[in-house]
Structures are given as C-alpha cells and as structure tokens.
Image (cartoon, rainbow, N blue to C red):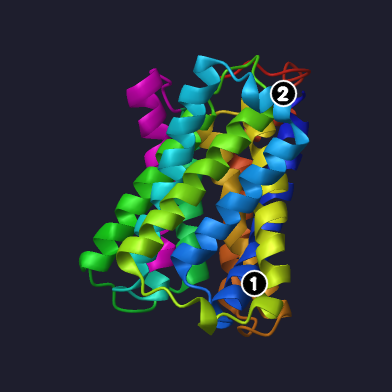
C-alpha cells in the first residue's frame, strides 16, 4: 500500500470517529453510563469481527495475540482513565490534555523502538498542539492542574502507547486479529469499570433510542474505523499516525456544530487550520520524487 493511501484511510478513520462524539453524546443523554457504553461497544465490536473472520481469529499467532493484547489494553485503559479524569476537570482541560499524546508518541517510539524523531515531526507537534489549544479555547481560560488533569494525562499516555505498538504490529498478520483483541479488551474494561465504579441502572436507559448510536459506535467507530486504522498504520510511523488522528477533534467539532451542540467559532476555524498545517508540515518530504510506491516502515 502506498503511503498516500494509508494517510487517506487514516483521515477517513478520523471522520468516522468525529461523528462518534455525537453518538456518545446521544447514548449518554439517553441513560447509558460510560462503562455500560464501552462494554456494549466492545461486545458488539468483537462479536462482529469474530462472525466475519472466525478462521483468522481462531488461528491468530502468538505475536498477533501479544500485540493485540498490548494495543487493546492500552487503548481501553486510555478510555477508562480519560473518563475518570473527566469527572474532576473541565471539558477544555480534558480535551487539551488528551492531545498531549501527540508530544509523547515520537519520544515513546524513540525510547521503545529506537526510532529517532525527525525535526519536521517535532515542529509539526508544536504547530498541532498550538492548534488544539486554539480549538479547545485552553489558551483563553485559566488552566489549573488537579487530580482530574492527572488522570487525563495518564489516559493520553495510554492512548500514545496504543498508537506506538499498533505501528509495530506483525506485518503478516490479518487486521481482524488486532481488531478482535481491541474489542475484547474494551468489553472487559467497560464491564469492570461499570461494576466497580458505577451504579448500574438498566431501567434508566431508553433502549429504543440508544440502539442506533450504539450500533454506529460499535460497527462504525470500532469495527470499520479501527480496522482501517490497523491496516493503515502498517505503512505509517507512529508519529505521523498520531498527528493525522488529531483530526478526530476537528471533525468532532464540525459535527457538533452541524448537529447544534455548539456554535461555530473562529477558534474552530483557526485551530482546525493549524492542525491541518501540522499534518502537511509532518509530510513535507511527500512531494519529493523519491517518495514513491510502498514506503518502508519507520
């Protein structure tokens, strides 16, 4: 697969995930708790993968299982710690601090796999973080660190680790094995979080109204988007993938405006523009003549 194709696939992933913010909002507003929602997403996600690719799942190699467990566990822990942090901090702080995984990923890849970040990657990180700061309004309000912020930073660390290890998945493995492991770990994490930290009330859920949002999240955001993510990241470095995935926040804001959850602001335009610029900056060598065909994994 060409690097340009992988980038396009990952952008499609961010569009789907951006719409997922609306699905999450709808499900939570109709009585589902965070743990219950993640449990349902993980269960449906893993079930669909198994039904579609039973032979691949049952014959996954040890390397696929290990990588899938690592990626899935870090991804699930990211969702859980982010949810805990959201209880004690503001939405702006939570959104801005979660994006710190953009800064973490190049150095994680350097520390774990000895992949030295390039200067353009570091410059892109600075521009991207500036864009997220403008987009969330974090630069315009008082920023005070508290226990919720600490949990959110830990969540960003987990998300960053999932991206780093996903970039090093077994090349000969089928994408369905990684997707299945991500679904199973999300289900397990959601179940544990629901049983330990939440007051379970199935009667409070408007089940007929949460079906469509949950199906969108499970099949769209998880099965389709995360499968595309697994396929695309075979051909991209962790640093590049992380920057592209930051578009999720931009598309999330766009969908939020379109569905009437928030007004259009100049911050959305300027912040989104800076993030797009950071992606172009990170791939500035893409115009060189030698950058053709399949790009070796960095």
Q: Quadrant of residue 81?
A: bottom left
Front: mark 1 or 2? 2
Of 57 and 29, the residue lying toward us: 57
Q: Which residues are magenta?
A: 94-117
* Marks 1 and 2, the one that precedes in the sequence: 1
Residue that extends furthest to the front in the rendered view of this protein: 203
Identify the residue at horizontal 41%, vertical 50% (top origin): 78
Of 63 and 55, the residue lying toward us: 55
Q: Are marks 1 and 2 in contact (CB under 8 Å)?
A: no
Mark 2: secondary structure: helix
What secondary structure is the magenta-colored segment mainly? helix
Query: Can residue 46 be seen here?
Result: yes
Residue 127, percent from left and from top: 49, 51
Q: Is residue 290 magenta?
A: no
Identify the residue at horizontal 45%, vertical 63% (top origin): 35
Q: Would residue 199 appear left or right of 48 to someone viewing this image?
A: left
Residue 179, percent from left and from top: 62, 37
Is 109 located above or below residue 78 in the figure?
Answer: above
Mark 1: secondary structure: helix
Query: Can residue 228 be seen here?
Result: no
Q: Label 1 vs label 2: CA separation? A: 34 Å
**Which image quadrant: the N terminus?**
top right
Is 94 located above or below residue 185 in the figure?
Answer: below
Q: Is residue 107 magenta?
A: yes
Is 101 located above or below residue 1 in the figure?
Answer: below
Q: Which residue is mark 1?
A: 22
**Which image quadrant: the C terminus?**
top right
Of 222 and 145, the residue lying toward us: 222
Q: Which residue is mark 2?
A: 55
């Amino acid at each position: 697969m060409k690097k340009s194709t992988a980038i396009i696939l990952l952008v499609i992933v961010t569009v789907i995930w951006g719409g997922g913010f609306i699905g999450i909002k709808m499900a939570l507003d109709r009585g589902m708790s965070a743990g219950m929602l993640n449990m349902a997403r993980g269960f449906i996600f893993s079930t669909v993968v198994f039904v579609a690719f039973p032979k691949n799942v049952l014959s996954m190699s040890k390397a696929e299982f290990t990588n899938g467990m690592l990626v899935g566990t870090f991804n699930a822990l990211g969702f859980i710690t982010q949810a805990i942090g959201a209880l004690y901090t503001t939405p702006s702080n939570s959104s801005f601090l979660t994006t710190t995984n953009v800064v973490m990923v190049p150095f994680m890849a350097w520390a774990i796999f000895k992949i030295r970040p390039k200067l353009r990657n570091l410059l892109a990180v600075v521009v991207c973080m500036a864009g997220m700061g403008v987009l969330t309004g974090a630069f315009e309000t008082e920023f005070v660190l508290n226990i919720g912020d600490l949990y959110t930073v830990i969540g960003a660390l987990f998300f960053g680790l999932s991206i780093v290890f996903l970039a090093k998945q077994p090349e000969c493995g089928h994408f369905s094995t990684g997707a299945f492991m991500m679904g199973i770990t999300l289900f397990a994490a959601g179940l544990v979080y629901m049983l330990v930290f939440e007051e379970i009330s199935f009667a409070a859920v408007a089940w007929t109204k949460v079906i469509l949002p949950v199906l969108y999240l499970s099949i769209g955001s998880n099965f389709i988007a995360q499968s595309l993510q697994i396929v695309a990241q075979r051909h991209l470095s962790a640093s590049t993938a992380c920057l592209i995935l930051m578009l999720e926040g931009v598309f999330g804001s766009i969908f939020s405006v379109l569905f009437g959850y928030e007004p259009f602001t100049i911050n959305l335009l300027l912040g989104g523009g800076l993030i797009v610029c950071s992606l172009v900056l990170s791939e500035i060598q893409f115009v060189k003549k030698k950058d053709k065909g399949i790009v070796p994994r960095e």
